[in-house]
């Protein structure tokens, strides 16, 4: 059964409509973890998400559902109308707009900072912490099945990163955070900027979200930081930003390795082993920037 056929059957069930009232318009491109389609149902547009292969290894759907419900009143996400914890299928109202990776993110720094402040200062507390170190250990453990041994380079970079933990990873700083606030998840709409895809949400250091904004180009995060802080950052504040971006590169290094081992390089035509190496290059670069 194709994705389009499955989507049609599921929408018939969820919305109690006939097949003729459902039209799978197109797949949204950009993500490498999920398949997301625009679907027209009885004249109204929705998005339908199908998780990619073994995506449940990295996203706990119970946690995701909890966090989506938690942030609904913030009005930043598109409204979820169906969520299946077992399959990860999610149907949400479609919001017309343009993701920032198709625009110039530097023109939206004030809006992006405003959204992050709205989340971080919401006083909402998730039942779940993002727990970077615990998550990194979990992702590393997935590779054991493939008799993989991390390179000496990775272990040395990780050790140097961990040496900064006591200074920059402070539990008293934890607030509700989006967890994946890269520019592709910000959408410019007629009603202003919106923020989608709350799969990695949890209590975290707010600098984690600022660092995520630099996923494509770290200069975007460096530009966002003074706007978010409303002042010129100190050396220590820049250091915290580099610290969390270093973590993210080590984390995604492990994810890229896992995707290689489960065959996604072949399935998606993406060289995840090469990408894993690039993440280590970035980790080394960011660690050198910590003064």
Image: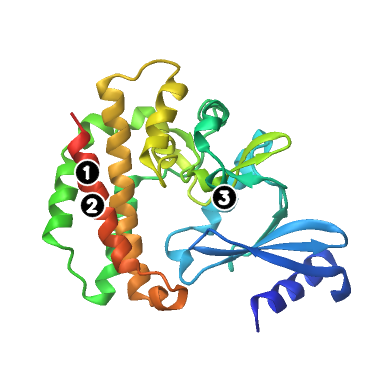
List x then y, in percent, for residue 41: 83, 63
Residue lying at 63% horizontally and 65% vertically, measured from the top left: 89
User: Relative to 52, is 261 on the left or the right?
Assistant: left
Figure quadrant of the C terminus: top left
Q: Residue at x 54, y 64 (%)?
A: 34
Badge 3: residue crowd in 10 Å (few <14, some 14–19, many ≥20): some
- Residue 228 rendering spot, x and y as whole percentages: 46, 24
Tell me the distance, in whole angstroms, between the alpha carbons under discs 1 and 3: 28 Å
Q: Check disc 1 and report its element: helix, strand or loop.
A: helix
**Residue 1 image offset from top left, x and y in percent:** 65, 84
Distance, label 1 to label 2, CA atoms, is: 6 Å
Q: Residue at x 37, y 76 (%)?
A: 262
Circle 3 sits on which residue? 197
Rounded to the nearest whole Å, what is the CA distance between mark 3 and mark 2?
Answer: 27 Å
Residue 223 found in image quarter: top left
- Judging depth in this view, the residue of 47 and 102 nearest the camera is 102
Name the residue nearer the viewer: 112 or 120. Answer: 112
Q: Whole-percent x and y of residue 68?
A: 61, 46
Q: Earlier in the sequence, mark 1 or mark 3?
A: 3
In this rendering, the count of numbered labels is 3
Determine which of the numbered discs, if any, sits on residue 285 in the image: 1
- Apparent side of residue 49 relative to residue 147 in the rendered image (left or right): right
Q: Quadrant of residue 172?
A: top left
Dot 2, how many residues are within 10 Å of its Cα: few (below 14), some (14-19), or many (20+)? Answer: some
Q: Which residue is mark 2?
A: 281
Quadrant for residue 84, please give it: bottom right
Q: What residue is at 20 percent from the left and 40 percent from the top?
A: 287
Secondary structure state at the residue bearing disc 2: helix
Can residue 166 be seen here? Answer: yes
Image vertical order of residue 122 relative to residue 132, above or below: above
């Amino acid at each position: 059964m194709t994705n389009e056929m499955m989507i049609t059957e599921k929408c018939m069930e969820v919305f109690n409509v006939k097949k003729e009232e459902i039209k799978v318009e197109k797949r949204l491109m950009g993500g490498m973890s999920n398949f997301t389609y625009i679907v027209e149902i009885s004249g109204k547009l929705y998005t339908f998400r199908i998780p990619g292969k073994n995506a449940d290894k990295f996203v706990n759907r119970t946690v995701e559902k909890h966090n989506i419900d938690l942030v609904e009143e913030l009005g930043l996400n598109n409204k979820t109308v169906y969520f299946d914890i077992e399959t990860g299928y999610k149907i949400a109202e479609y919001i017309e707009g343009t993701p920032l990776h198709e625009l110039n993110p530097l023109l939206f720094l004030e809006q992006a900072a405003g959204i992050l402040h709205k989340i971080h200062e919401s006083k909402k507390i998730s039942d779940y912490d993002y727990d970077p170190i615990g998550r990194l250990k979990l992702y590393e453990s997935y590779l054991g099945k493939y008799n993989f041994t991390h390179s000496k380079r990775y272990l040395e970079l990780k050790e140097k990163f961990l040496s900064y933990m006591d200074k920059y990873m402070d539990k008293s700083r934890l607030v509700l955070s989006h967890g994946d606030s890269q520019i592709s998840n910000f959408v410019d709409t007629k009603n202003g900027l919106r923020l989608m895809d709350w799969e990695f949400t949890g209590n975290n250091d707010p600098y984690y979200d600022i660092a995520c904004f630099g996923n494509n180009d770290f200069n975007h995060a460096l530009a966002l930081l003074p706007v978010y802080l409303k002042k010129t950052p100190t050396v220590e504040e820049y250091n915290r930003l580099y610290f969390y971006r270093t973590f993210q590169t080590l984390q995604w290094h492990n994810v890229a390795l896992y995707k290689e081992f489960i065959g996604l390089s072949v399935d998606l035509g993406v060289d995840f082993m090469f990408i894993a190496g690039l993440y280590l290059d970035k980790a080394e670069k960011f660690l050198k920037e910590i003064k």
